[in-house]
Amino acid sequence: MTEQNFDDMDFLAEDSDGIVVDSPDENQKFEHYRFVADKGQNMLRIDKFLSVRIEGISRNRIQQAAEADCILVNGQSVKSNYKVKPLDVISIVMDRPRRELEIIPENIPLNVVYEDDALMVINKPAGMVVHPGHGNYTGTLVNAVAYHLHRDNISDINDPRLGLVHRIDKDTSGLLLVAKTPEAKTNLSGQFFRKETKRVYVALVWGNPAEDHGTVEGNIGRDPNDRMRMRVFPDGEQGKAAVTHYSVLERFGYVTLVQCRLETGRTHQIRVHMKHIGHPLFNDERYGGNEILRGTRFTKYKQFIANCFALCPRQCLHAQTLGFVHPTTEEELYFESDIPEDMQSVIDKWRAYSKVDVMI
């Protein structure tokens, strides 16, 4: 079977608003992707055939594409219940040309904590997407880095000239490491792979952990029921191994400030692991932390939570410390970033609330 890269399959992305957009010529179609079924292909519904071949795409989204006549088999549109046969040529078409992912340097301010000839450490604000993708082709940290480093004509976020060594979520703030040379990127990426870096996060979580220290182990993979979320697979048969160590910093009764140290770096790792043990991150909408999970039913308390959510309209998670060995000098470097104002204001409110609650 042959296939194309699906990184720009924006019309099927989970956060897409629709399948088809208006076109000056509604009869003109552009082929975006093509599959050729193997000679030994068993009869299989086309929505299932495509869903197992396109990472991050649900069968529901593929069914919508079929309803919009965007899926062709041997040149003819088919519905989602079509059974794929050996050597079928399957095309995905749209009424607009493919958009190639081009990384455009943009003059976006960066909070550079440290920089030398080999690398730079950036303090990323919450709300900034790290790299271009569906719905975020510009305005990302990678666009800003490309401008800062005077990099042009880049179409691959893994291009060594960009130097992105690791990533953090859009709504997570904190320290990010960028290599400035291919040699530095190879060295630093190796440190991450061998788990030699030191990464510590601060998080505000719902509930009151029973122990002051703990370790969460459990494979993390995409949730089959909601492909925008990750989940823990305790049996280890799916997902990738993940280990998170946590320590309690301060208890506020209904929420707790914790420090999390990563051994691995899986997608949404801290968010998923803390939810798995019953302590979702405060105001983490994707993992249920944007509901009142602990506390009272009094109106005054509900208003207090609403005020906290408004102060920090994101998951309360900050990449506070980052340590690694310099790829050239071999010096061990260690950086620390203050908790940003939005998250700190919520911590301060909980600290004050817990003292008043104890007095009452």
Image: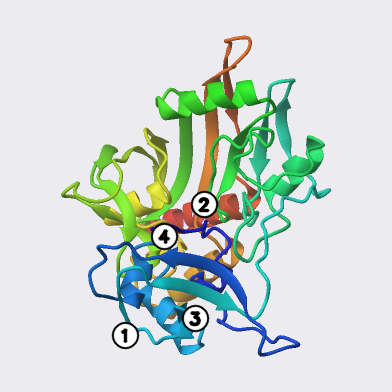
Q: CA distance from mark 4 to mark 2?
A: 37 Å
Horizontal side of 22 relative to 168 (left or right) equals right
Instruction: Give the mark toward the camera: 1 or 2.
Output: 1
Amino acid type for the residue under numbered disc 4:
Glu
Q: Residue 22: x percent and y percent?
A: 69, 87
Instruction: Give the mark toward the camera: 1 or 3.
Output: 3
Which of disc 2 and disc 1 is earlier in sequence?
Answer: 1
The residue that mark 2 highlights is 347
Q: CA distance from mark 1 to mark 4?
A: 20 Å
The residue that mark 3 highlights is 75
Which of disc 4 and disc 1 is earlier in sequence?
Answer: 4
Q: Are marks 4 and 2 in contact (CB under 8 Å)?
A: no
Q: CA distance from mark 1 to mark 3?
A: 17 Å
The residue that mark 1 highlights is 81
Q: Is residue 239 above or below residue 66?
A: above
Element type at marker 1?
A: loop
Instruction: Give the mark toward the camera: 4 or 3.
Output: 3
Q: Residue at x 42, y 40 (%)?
A: 265
Element type at marker 4?
A: loop
Q: Is residue 39 above or below residue 332?
A: below
Amino acid type for the residue under numbered disc 2:
Ile
The residue that mark 4 highlights is 55
Which of disc 2 and disc 4 is earlier in sequence?
Answer: 4
Amino acid type for the residue under numbered disc 3:
Gly
Q: CA distance from mark 3 to mark 2?
A: 59 Å
